[in-house]
Amino acid sequence: MNYQYDYAVIGGDTRQVYLVEELAHHTTRICHYALCATPDHRRCSDTSLVAAKSSLEKICNVSSCIICPIPFTRNGNFLNQSVFDEDLPINLILSNLKPDQTLFAGCIPEKFRLEAVGRGVHVFDLMSDQSLARYNSIATAEGAICEAIRQSPVNLHKSSCAVLGYGKCGSTLSCYLKGMFANLYVVSNEEDERAKAALIADRTGTLKDFGTCVGDFDFIFNTIPSKVITSDLLSEMKCTVAIIDIASAPGGVDFASAKKLGINALPCPGLPGKYAPSSSAKAIKETIERILKEEQKCL
């Protein structure tokens, strides 16, 4: 089937806007819908075509490659977008997809993925790509540090910091904090993660261990997407502590209890879209082009 556009970019945060501009550096045809801002045509090639579409139905029918946001949805039902007051069901996208189209997004619900694949659609979860997830952790770590500096009157230099979780984001963030000469305590229940963290951290421990020293910290960064910072732990913390939660929804902090106790706890989803949208968009573009090239080789 011949499509009018090479790419259709839908919804999301500022990363999607920059992604349109990155894709338009070549002789490409790009359409977009529900972006949070209008792409700057000065950053697009004169030989490219960039056009807005008026509905989900229209945009899903004019391109072979559909690029949805990271995350695809925040509640499992509606597209992640901030333009329209009316919710846009992700099932509306599903019902308009056709065999042999390709869909990219981040954190795609398994039910949606299976139904799309059943329709003959090639589905790729961008956050399952290891290289992109690692690059994404850089923007996340830099954003988390920026938020921490904004939220506290205390220098990170020589402060006492705890990082909960030592996956991609936790390990990258730990490297940044040690580079700023923070005293670092890494928390993980995984023995292998603690062993890796011990290479750079001043101390490591389990979540149980963390509970015995929780009052020591000036900054706490959580990357674990389950309720690990409970009301009991919050009651033992310094009143001046700054908690930065960068975990995926639903996060890992009892925010209601933190508010009651006067503890400064900040949920920080989507940091790459807030602090490094241009760099993040470039990484997304390169990942998409690499995957499409690999898929073409397999045909």
Image (tube, rainbow, N blue to C red):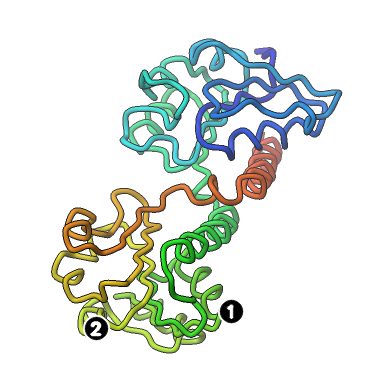
Choose mark 1 or mark 2, whichever is in front.
1
Measured Cα–Cα span from mark 1 to mark 2: 25 Å
x then y, percent, for residue 4: 69, 13
View extreme (left): residue:
232
Disc 2 residue type (three-letter): Asp
Q: Is residue 97 left or right of residue 265?
A: right
Q: Which of the pair 108/69 is nearer the observer?
A: 69
Is 228 positioned to the left or the right of 269 in the image?
left
Secondary structure type for disc 2: helix
**Position of 298 relative to 154 (above/below):** above
Residue 233 place in picture, x, y as percent: 19, 72
Q: Is residue 259 left or right of residue 92?
A: left
Image quadrant in which you'd find residue 176: bottom right
Q: In the rendering, which numbered label is found on residue 209?
A: 2
Q: Label 2: few (<14), some or many (≥20) within 10 Å? A: few
**In-front residue for pair 201/154:** 154
Q: Residue at x 49, y 51 (%)?
A: 271
Q: Quadrant of residue 110?
A: top left
Q: Position of residue 216 (x, y in %)?
A: 30, 83
Please tell me which of labels 1 and 2 falls first in the chain: 1
Residue depicted at 65% across the width and 13% down the height: 1
Instruction: Tally the numbered discs.
Output: 2
Q: Quadrant of residue 17?
A: top right
- Quick one: SS at disc 1? helix
Q: Which residue is mark 1?
A: 179
Relative to 120, residue 299 above or below: below
Cβ atoms at labels 1 and 2 below 8 Å apart = no
Q: Residue at x 39, y 79 (%)?
A: 186
Residue 138, image x, y percentages: 57, 61
Q: Amino acid at mark 1?
A: Gly
Q: Residue furthest front?
A: 153
In what quadrant of the picture does the C terminus appear?
top right
